[in-house]
Amino acid sequence: MIIGILLFILIEIGGVYFLNFKMNIPESRMQAANWVLQFSILSFLISIVSIPYNSVLIAHEKMDVYACFSIIEFSLKLFVALLLPVLLFDRLVLYSILIFIVTVFIRAIYQVYCRSHFAECKSIKLCIERKMGKDVFSYSGWNMIGSLATISRQQGINIIQNLFFGTIINAAHSVAIQVASALTQFTNNIFLATRPSITKLYAQGKTDEIWKLVFYSTKYTLYLFTLVVIPVYIEMPMILHMWLGDVPGITIAITRLMIVSISVEIVCAQIFAVFQAANMLKKVQLLSCSIILSVLPVSYFILKVNSENPLLPYIISLIASFLFTSTTLIVAKFELKLKVVNYLCVSILSPLCIASLIFLLSVVFVLGLSSLLLDYFILFFL
């Protein structure tokens, strides 16, 4: 709650100033933008203070309950989106209000379930316990820094694009973020099911079993990711047209660059679970966050020199993804005794070869088809 309140104050001060005095937004929509910012900040605050309840569910491995709550959440958000065309009020403002209401509702059902099923959640009170507080603050603090770096890269690029190219590129960026977030959520949910086991194995000192679980969960997640991402990548023009109709022409290129960037970062995603289990986040987060955050100043200065190509920040972000993954593997080699070559051979090589083969066959195969919809389904089964 302290972290949430501090972030709330920080975003209120910095966000309101930046939105009203720096962002490139039409004057007629500035009031709506301020409403959206306020409800987005409130939704963010609710999400932050909900983390302990989400974590309890995962720690108890109640994945069925977690899945049910997730289905409810995303169904409600879908309902909100489908409801917008029939509403007469300012839809942008109304959307942010309704999403905030959904966030509060989901927080409430998590809290009610956890307090009624888990003893540690039934009575929560403020207490000071220095040793545990230090460990928790260190763990959550370094985790939070990593999360904020990722968010800053996504939204920072969006702000930079607004400063140089206006709201059209913001629209393209937002569509690409939706696709990228869906793919990221897909892989994160698969990894999520293994995280409690990794923590337990580390506590028991079973190092070989930890790495076996990390190796094979990464391998099979990449297989599933390949199944989803290749049809999406190749058929991006059709998917966006069916989903949204007309979109800015650059949307396809931005989305594809984001997908490749995500694909690179998945390589080391599961290794972070071992860093977390060992509470050895400081070094890897300092290095990886520095790489991720460097995307923003580098993108800004490059666009200052050459402001004609809005794809430059995404290319820089992709380069940063390669550096981020490489750095994480190197730190894991020295800090966690990861056998990097073994990891790459067991977890990455096979999915990469299969993905490359399927991609090449798919590109050749779908070029000869005439029906776009048939095209996609045949590609998916291939």
Image (cartoon, grey):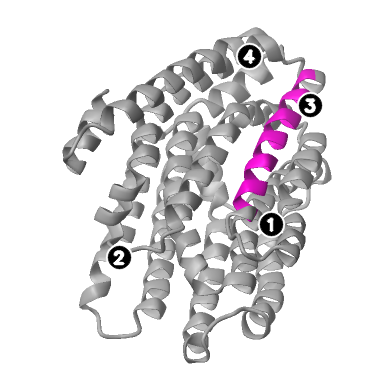
Q: Give the residue at x 35% y 30%.
A: 363
Q: Give the residue at x 40% y 57%.
A: 106
How far apart marks 4 and 2 lie (CA) works out to: 42 Å
Type of amino acid at the residue the image marks with label 2 = Ala
Question: Which SS class for mark 2?
Answer: helix
Question: Which SS class for mark 4?
Answer: helix
**On the rendered structure, is 139 left or right of 91?**
right
Question: Which SS class for mark 3?
Answer: helix
Question: Which SS class for mark 1?
Answer: loop
In this figure, which residue is indicated by the disc labeled 3?
Answer: 331
Query: Which picture quadrant has residue 6?
Result: bottom right
**On the rendered structure, is 22 left or right of 355?**
right
Q: Which x, y percent locates residue 248?
A: 41, 64
Alpha-carbon neighbours of circle 2 within 10 Å: few (<14), some, or many (≥20)?
some
- Residue that extends furthest to the bottom in the rendered view of this protein: 28
Type of amino acid at the residue the image marks with label 1 = Leu
Q: Earlier in the sequence, mark 3 or mark 4?
A: 3
In this figure, which residue is indicated by the disc labeled 1?
Answer: 126
**What span is in magenta?**
313-333
Type of amino acid at the residue the image marks with label 3 = Val
115 is higher (above) or lower (below) than 26: above
Q: Nearer the viewer, residue 140 or 31?
A: 31
Decide if residue 357 is in sight here: yes
Residue 81: give its label.
2
How far apart marks 1 and 2 lie (CA) works out to: 39 Å
Q: Nearer the viewer, residue 9 or 108?
A: 9
Residue 343: give its label.
4
Circles 2 and 3, Cβ within 8 Å, touching? The answer is no
Query: Which picture quadrant has residue 306?
Result: bottom right
Q: Give the residue at x 57% y 40%.
A: 261
Q: Which x, y percent locates residue 236?
A: 36, 46
